[in-house]
Image (cartoon, helix red, strand yellow):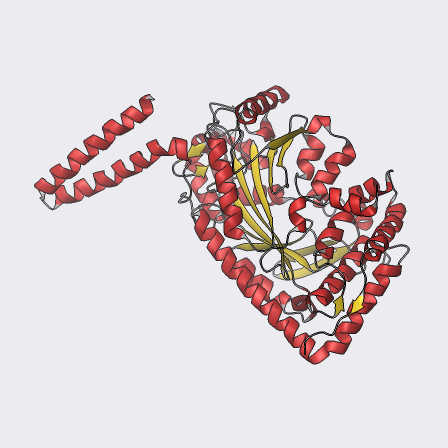
Amino acid sequence: MSLEQFISNAISPWMKDPGPDDDIVMSTRIRLARNLEDYPFPSSTSQEAARALYKHVYEQLSRTSNEKVGKLIWLPMDGLSKIEKTVLVEKHLTSPQLAEESEQGAVVLNNDETISMMVNEEDHLRIQCLSPGFQLSEGYEAADELDDWIESHVTYAFDEKKGYLTSCPTNVGTGMRASVMMHLPALVTTQQLNRILPAVSQLGFVVRGIYGEGSEARGNLFQISNQMTLGKSEEDIIEELRGVVLQLIERERNTRRELLKHNQLQLSDQVHRSYGILANSRIIESKEAANHLSTLRLGIDLDLIRGIEGNILNELMVLIQPAFLQQFAEQGLTADGRDERRATLIRERLKLETIQDGGGET
Amino acid sequence: MQCQECNQRQATLHFTKIVNAKKTEMHLCEMCAKEKGDEFAGSNSYSIHDLLSGLLNVDPSTGSGEGYSQQVGQAYTLQCPKCSMHYKDFINNSRFGCSYCYEAFSAKLDPILKRVHGGNHTHTGKIPKRQGGRLKLKREISSLKTKMQTHIDREEFEHAAEVRDKIRELQEAKEKEEGL
C-alpha cells in the first residue's frame, strides 16, 4: 500500500474536510451518555447482563435505519485485534477502557466516522458526533437527532428531576460533554494562556491536553469542554462554551497578527527550522514531533510557508501515535523503533508536498 | 522539566501537597514516582473517580470530614433494592450500580450533585421524546395545581374552577398515555 493510500485509509474521512474557523479550531465533539431502563450499569454488571444489553440494543437498532443517521457498522470488541482496538482509541472513536476491559462492548460507526457510539462502556451508550472545525450547534443537532432515533427504539433511564441517569454522578442531567479542540501556539508562546486558563476553569469549563485526563498539552493543542451537566440545558451549555471559544479564537488571531507584525523574521525562521527537523530527522520522539508540527501549522496559517496542506497537523498527530506507526510498519515496534518509524513517516508525508517559501502578511 | 529525583528523565508526574498552608511541589518521572510509590499511594492510577470518592467522603452538611463518622451508620444502611448496591460502595467507587440507585440514595444525593454541578441538582435540559409526552403532562399538571391554589387563596373561585377543568382534561390525557 502506498503512503497516500495508507494515510487516506487511516484518518477519518471527516478530517479531510475543512471546517469553520479551522485555522484555530481543529475539531468539535459532542458526547451524550445514555442508559437503558431496567439494565444494571456496565461498571457493576455481570458478563451475562452486559451481553443481554448488547443483544437488546443490537436487535432494536440494527434492523432499522434513519435517513439522516445513515448506515451504521457494528464492531464488537471481541472480534477486533489488539492493534485494531488501539487504532480506534487513537482515532478517538473508542476509549482505552472499552478497548482494554470490555468483552461485551462494541463500537458503532457511520461511514464517514462523524458518528460513533460505544456500547457497554461506563454507560450503556455513549453517543459521539465529531466534526471538523468549530461546529458546536451542528454537532449537537446531529447528536440530538441520533439520540431521538435511538430513543424511539429503546427506553432510556430518565428521571424528571435528575435527567438522564448515568453511571457516574458527574454526567447526570444532560449527559452531555461538548468539547472543542483548539490549536493555540501564539497564546502559549506569549505566555498569555497561563493567565487565561484559570479564568476559563472558573467559568465551569475544563481545559486538557489532547490525550485526555491528566495529560499535558502537546503540539499546543487544548481540549475545552463543559464540566457541569446538571441544571443547564444543552443549548445553554453550548452557548456558554461557544462564548469562551470565540474569545480564545479572537485572542489567538490577534496575537498571531502581532507576532507577525513585530517578529516576522524570527517566526519565519522558527517555522522553517521546524520544517527542516521534520523533513530530515531519522529519529523523533512524539513530543518533539508534535511541537514542530504545531510550529509548521502556524507557519501554514500565517502564509510563511506554502505548498503544505493545512490539515497536516491533524493528520500527522493521529498517524504518529503508536498503533498507527505499527500499522504503517506492519509489525510490532519498540519505543526506539517507533521513534525511527515516526521520523520516516513524517519525512515521507512531507515529500508528498512541494514546499515553497511564503511571503507572510505584513 | 527534569525529574527532581534522578535529574535525568523528563518529569511527567507533578504533585502539589498543601499542609497547613505550606505548599510543596514535586516533579518526578514515572520510574522514580513508582519507586516512591509508598509516599504517593495510588498516584499511578489517580483518576476522576478517586477524586470524586474523596469528595463524596466529605460530609456535605459540615463541609468537612468532621461529623462524618456520626453519619456513617445512617448512610451505610442505604441499599438499592434493585441492584443491591450499598451506599458505601457507591461512596467507594463513585459509580451507581443501576438507575434505581438514584432513588435509593436520594436522601444523600442532592448535596453531592450540588457539589459536582456548581450548585445545581435539578435537570432543566432535554426530555426524551417518546417518554417525554407523559412527563410534559405531569409537569404541566403540577404547574396548574400551583396556579389553582393561588386562585383559591385569592378567593378567585371562577378562575380556580377553570384551571381545575383544565387539570382534569390533562389528567385524562396522561392516563390515556400511560395506558398505551
Q: In the depicted view, which residue is nearer to us: B161 or A140?
A: A140
Q: Nearer the viewer, residue A174 or A147?
A: A147
Determine whether, in the image, residue A21 is placed left or right of residue A218.
Answer: left
Left or right: residue B113 compared with residue A256: left
Q: Is residue B66 visible?
A: no
User: How far across and down, in percent of the image, does residue A287 sit?
Assistant: 78, 56
Instruction: Left or right? Give the position of A291 relative to A43.
Output: right
Quarter of the figure with residue A188: bottom right
Q: Can you give x and y, in whole percent of width and height, for residue B157 in the image?
A: 9, 40
Residue A158 to residue B39: above or below? above
Image point (67%, 45%), residue name = A13
In the rendered image, residue B175, in percent from the top left (x then y), is placed at 28, 25
Q: In the displayed structure, would residue A61 be above or below residue A203?
A: above
Between A311 and A336, the residue placed more toward the observer is A311
Quadrant location, the C terminus of chain A: bottom right
Q: Name the residue located 24 percent from the left edge and 32 percent from the top edge.
A: B170
